[in-house]
Image (spheres, rainbow, N blue to C red):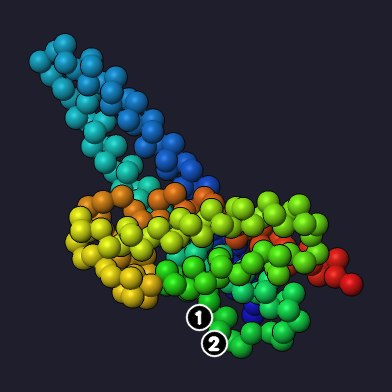
Amino acid sequence: MEYEALASLHFAVNDLRHEWVASRAVVDRMIALIDHADHADSETRFAHRSKALSQVSRAAYRYSRAVETAMWPCVSAYTVLGITLLDRVVSGHGPLEAHTVHALSGEPTVAELQAALSIPVAGLQRARFSSAQESAQEHQDEVLSAVEGLYQDLADSARDKPLDRVQAAACRLTEADDPGIDPLWEGLLEPLAFLAEQNTLEIGYYLDHRD
């Protein structure tokens, strides 16, 4: 069950990651086309081109936002489940209970994500040289710092429903998503996807190199 859950999240994140990159490329391309169209249309009494492109651009942005919204629960769960399973394996503990695997396969709260990222890399990557552990710890610390920054973001008075620290710790970002502002997971998707992938690979590496 652990393997199936991890594999399912892996393939979901992998597919959505490719779709996300493609959707962002479309948005960027539409912005460039609109800039050119606005300049061209300013010299005529008609603006059909810029209006049409703007309509498509808004649709492209909504699609990209939809991909991000679907990707966040998967990539955050993939991160927490991967770290939890790696910690279980290197600690020599038995398999997780079925209900625990199911729970870890869902979108974590901010506090749950923060707790998983707070586990020292040295304890997780025992089969690696210290230099590799230090590099991995630096990356994990950067991601952890970004996650800790969510507390401030969630308390922002510009939000529809600002949250205090206790409320923010217990919330899931998809529940707190505010369409009127930039997504809270902006800037977190890519580094979390990378970290989750590395932790999954680390499980196999440890099993192959343990004493």
Residue 4: name its quadrant: bottom right
Q: Residue at x 79, y 60 (%)?
A: 128
Q: Is residue 69 visible?
A: no
Tell me the number on the disc at residue 99: 2
Residue 149 relative to residue 118: left or right: left
Which residue is rendered at x = 33% and y = 42% of the image? 60
Task: Give the x, y percent position of residue 5.
Answer: 60, 73
Q: Position of residue 61 (x, y in %)?
A: 32, 44
Q: In the image, residue 80 lies at what x, y percent?
A: 55, 69
Callout 1 amino acid: Ala
Q: Nearer the viewer, residue 169 or 38?
A: 169
Task: Tell me, yes or no, if residue 73 can be seen here.
Answer: yes
- Where residue 7 sits, quadrant-wise, is bottom right
In the orientation shown, which residue stands out farthest toward the top? 43
Relative height, residue 11 to residue 98 (above, below): above
Give neighbour class at mark 1: few <14, some 14-19, many 20+ (Cα, 10 Å). few
Q: CA distance from mark 1 to mark 2?
A: 6 Å
Q: Which residue bears the numbered disc 1?
A: 103
Residue 206, x across and y down, in percent? 79, 67
Verify CB contact (< 8 Å) between mark 1 and mark 2. yes
Give the amino acid type for the residue marked by disc 2 in the picture: His
Q: Given the current orientation, which residue lies at the most extreme right position?
A: 211
Question: Where is the N terminus found, in terms of image quarters?
Answer: bottom right
Asked if 22 appears above or below 66 in the picture, the reply is above
Q: Is residue 88 left or right of residue 33?
A: right
Question: What secondary structure is found at the residue carrying circle 2?
Answer: helix
Q: Quadrant of the C terminus?
A: bottom right
Secondary structure under tag 1 reads helix
Residue 91: image tag: none
Residue sticking out furthest to the left: 45
Q: Quadrant of residue 39?
A: top left
